[in-house]
Image (tube, rainbow, N blue to C red):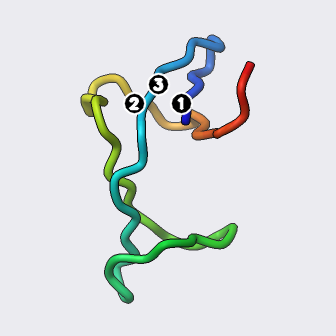
Amino acid sequence: MDIIDAKGNRLQSKVMKIENPVEGSINIAPAGYAVGILLANINVGQLHSGDIITNEKK
């Protein structure tokens, strides 16, 4: 999957885990659901508010 920033730059990563604060670890997060996402090979400084996570290829 890719993370796309406001300038259109892409970072490649993999979702390692998705968690909901109430339910804990989950496999699917419907739209509007509050989740935390553990990403492989991404540092927190590389992410910004408004970045997009997608599995669509260029």
What residue is pinned by disc 1?
Answer: 3
- The amino acid at mark 2 is Leu
Tag count in the figure?
Answer: 3
Dividing the picture into quadrants, the one containing residue 1 is top right
Say whether residue 32 is left or right of residue 23: right
Real-space CA distance between mark 2 and mark 3, rounded to the nearest whole angstrom: 12 Å
Identify the residue at image location x=42%, y=32%: 13
Real-space CA distance between mark 1 and mark 2, rounded to the nearest whole angstrom: 8 Å
> Residue 38: where, in percent of width, then height?
32, 51
Which disc is residue 16 wearing? none
> Residue 25: where, in percent of width, then height?
34, 76
Disc 2 packing (10 Å; few <14; some 14–19; many ≥20): some
Mark 1 touching mark 2, by CB under 8 A? yes
Q: Is residue 50 above or below residue 26?
A: above
Nearest to N terminus: mark 1 or mark 2: 1
What residue is pinned by disc 2?
Answer: 47
Q: Is residue 10 above or below residue 41?
A: above
